[in-house]
Image: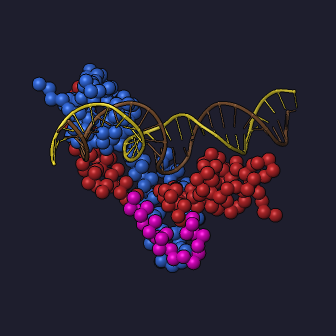
Chain colours: A red, B blue, C brown, D yellow
DNA sequence: CATACATGCTATAGTAACTGTAGGAGCAAG
DNA sequence: CTTGCTCCTACAGTTACTATAGCATGTATG
C-alpha cells in the first residue's frame, strides 16, 4: 500500500545528498529510519515532507537548532504560534544584519577596486587600502 | 630602540584575540614570532601593521587563503597588481552573490511573517509556508 | 618572603552544517 | 563471474576561529 523507498530515492526526490540525510538522522532532526532486513533505511512520503521542511527552512537561513524547535512546535497543533513567530522574526533580523554588513563590504570593495589602476603592487591602492582603513569598526558598529 | 611587546599587547592594539594571533601564526599568515628567553612571543610595530592588514581584509570578507596570497603579493613590490585586482573582484562577486541570496531570503521571511496572525500552530502560515514553498530553487538559481 | 593574580605557553576539542573518503556488503545485469 | 551501483558504518576534513585544561612565569601586595 504505502510506497517505500531507500535513501537514494529520498535524496533524489528532495534534492538533498544521501550523507546529509544520514547526518540529519544522526543529529535527530530526521527520525531514526526504519530498517529493512538488509539493514537499509526505508522511507515513506511523510519523510519527504519532513525533509522538505528542513531544506526549505535551511534555504531561508534558519539554523538546525531553529529547525529542531520548529519541528517540535509543528507537532503541537494546539500550541500558539507565538514561538514560531519569534523564531521567524529572529531569523529575519539575522538576515538583515548580514545584509547590512555585506552592503558596507560591497561599497568598500567597489571603492577600492575603482581606485586601482593596474600598476605595480608597490603602488596598488587596494593593498594600501587594506593596510590602512578602518572598515572593521564600521562593521562592528553595524552588526551590533 | 625598537619597542617590543608581548602577545597580549599586540592583541589590545589590534583588537584581535590572543588565541587568534597564535592561530594566525600556526597557519602561517603571521610569521613565527621571535621568542624571548622565557619563550614568550615578542612583537614590534611591523607586526601590528601585518595583523591590521589581515583583520581589515577579513572584515571585508576575504578568506584567509585570499589574504595569504595578498600578503605574498604585497611583498613583491615590482609585481603587477593584476592578481590583487583579480582577488578583490572575486571577493566583490562573492559578496554580491551573498547579498542576492539574502535579499530573497529577507523578502520571503517578511512575506511569511506578515501573513501569520498569531493563531495556533495548526493554522500557522509560517509553518505551512516552510512545508510548501519553493524558495530553495529560487536561491539555487540566484547563487549560481 | 609568601601568596594571589595576571599573563604566557602548548595541546586539544568544540563550533555549524555539512562533505568526502575508506573499507566493506548486497544485488542485478551482462 | 565480474562489473557496477547502491547501501552500510565510521571517521576525517572544511572555515575561522574560540574555549579549555594544565602548567610555567612574572608582578604586585601584604
Q: Quadrant location of residue B13?
A: top left
Q: Position of residue B33 (x, y in %)?
A: 29, 27
In-image side of B7 versus A71 (left or right):
left
Q: Nearer the viewer, residue A103 or B144?
A: A103
In-image side of A104 versus D15 (left or right):
left
Tell me the residue at 75%/49% (across/down). A40
Q: Is residue B22 above or below residue A51?
A: above
In-image side of B2 versus B48 (left or right):
left
Q: Position of residue B140 (x, y in %)?
A: 52, 50
Tell me the residue at 57%/69% (across/down). A74
Asked whether residue B108 is in view, the answer is yes
Q: How many marks?
A: 0
Q: What predominant SS class does the magenta segment belong to?
A: helix
Tell me the residue at 28%/55% (across/down). A142
Asked whether residue B14 is in view, the answer is no
Picture quarter with the N terminus of chain B: top left
Q: Position of residue D21 (x, y in %)?
A: 42, 42
Q: Position of residue B19 (x, y in %)?
A: 34, 39
Q: Is residue B38 above or below residue B111?
A: above
Q: Is residue A72 magenta?
A: yes
Residues rendered magenta in the picture = A71-94
Q: Nearer the viewer, residue B48 or A49?
A: B48
Q: Is residue A89 magenta?
A: yes
| Residue that sits furthest to the left in the current view | B1
Q: Nearer the viewer, residue D1 or A120?
A: D1
Tell me the residue at 23%/33% (across/down). B6
Amino acid at each position: 500500500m504505502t510506497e517505500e523507498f531507500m535513501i537514494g530515492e529520498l535524496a533524489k526526490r528532495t534534492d538533498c545528498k544521501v550523507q546529509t540525510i544520514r547526518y540529519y538522522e544522526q543529529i535527530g532532526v530526521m527520525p531514526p529510519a526504519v530498517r529493512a532486513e538488509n539493514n537499509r533505511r526505508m522511507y515513506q512520503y511523510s519523510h519527504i515532507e519532513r525533509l522538505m521542511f528542513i531544506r526549505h527552512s535551511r534555504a531561508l537561513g534558519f539554523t538546525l537548532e531553529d529547525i529542531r524547535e520548529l519541528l517540535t512546535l509543528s507537532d503541537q497543533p494546539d500550541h500558539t504560534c507565538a514561538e514560531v513567530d519569534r523564531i521567524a522574526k529572529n531569523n529575519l533580523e539575522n538576515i538583515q544584519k548580514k545584509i547590512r554588513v555585506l552592503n558596507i563590504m560591497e561599497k568598500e570593495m567597489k571603492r577600492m577596486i575603482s581606485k586601482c589602476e593596474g600598476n605595480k603592487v608597490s603602488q596598488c591602492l587596494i593593498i594600501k587600502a587594506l593596510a590602512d582603513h578602518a572598515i572593521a569598526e564600521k562593521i562592528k558598529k553595524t552588526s551590533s
